[in-house]
Amino acid sequence: MAYDEHRILEMLHEDDISRRRAFESIVRNFSEQLYWQIRHMVLSHDDANDILQNTFIKAWTNLDSFMGYSRISTWLYRIAINETLTFLNRQRATIPLETDDDDGLSIADRLESDPYFDGDLTERQLQEAIATLPDKQRLVFNMKYFNEMKYEEISEALGTSVGALKASFHIAVKKIEEYFNNVD
Amino acid sequence: MEKEKIYKIDEHEPRRPFNVPEGYFDNLTQNIMASLPQQESIYSTRITVTPWMRIRPYLYAAAAFTGIFFCIKAAVGISSRNSATDTAHAEETTIYSDEYIDSFLETAMIDDCTLYYTLVDVN
């Protein structure tokens, strides 16, 4: 079934079978892009997979609260972002402080031993640099740089003005370049 | 002097350095759909609106208005009964005509002094 948002919205208000079929279409259409958005934030495949599952379960169980005022993708992005930020906050609260080394090697070590990371040293350092950014800035940078989303799309998903997003991305780039120049 | 190497983001092609287990995206939709709660469980948590639930607020509102009405009615009733009692008392005092009182006094065989004390006692 080709993805037709208008038809999907209609089906979501029909009987159980139509609802499920419409939701399946939503999952098929958005799961991969949401996965990458989450993965860039949490880095681990297993964590990204869990958060993605939770995102869709939350969307499914709150389907009645989705009134169709925004696009389905925006609604899903918001749920995914909330789930991701909640996960990161919980992770920060539970991981002992001593593993968060001053020299930032913990992320590099994690990525080096991760079977689902195939980047070189520069890419590992880039991930380390990105990890130093505040959550919101990191989100903006990943959405723009890796997912190549337009500022208008990011603005819709994050509820932030395009101007503020441009400023946020610019600051993030400067910080990352500064990080690299200090490492070198 | 060796020129310092400056890292520039836009000089690097964005590349996703992550990968996923083989066939992960092929089965992703199926796995997610399998993890969703069944429709029944969603519907069981949904509130079914019965006719009673629909008319209940109106009944409660009607009961409240009826209560307020009776309270007001009772309050008005008490005050009007008080004023009615006063009126009746006033009527009692004016029901006897002067002629009747005069004839009563003439036949009562009482002197002025007794009449005075009688009037003082009554008031």
Image (cartoon, helix red, strand yellow):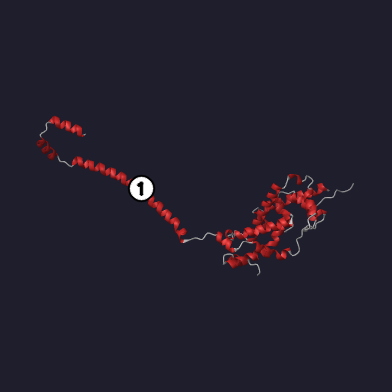
Q: Quadrant of the N terminus of chain A?
A: bottom right
Q: In the current view of this chain or complex, which residue is farthest to the right?
A: B1
Amino acid type of the residue tagged 1 in the rendering: Ile
Q: Residues within 10 Å of mark 1 (few under 14, many from 20)?
A: few
- Above or below, B116 against B83 in this view is above
* Residue identifier under label 1: B72
Closest to the observer: A28 or A72? A28
Image coords of residue A30 (percent x, y): 67, 62
| Residue displayed at 72% across by 52% down | A138
Visible in this render: residue B92?
A: yes
- Above or below, B22 against A88 in this view is below
Q: Secondary structure at mark 1?
A: helix
Image coords of residue B53 (percent x, y): 47, 58
Left or right position of A125 against A62: right
Image coords of residue B66 (percent x, y): 38, 52
| Residue displayed at 24% across by 43% down | B87
Left or right position of B101 against A21: left
Closest to the observer: B64 or B12? B64
Image coords of residue B68 (percent x, y): 38, 49
| Residue displayed at 17% across by 33% down | B118
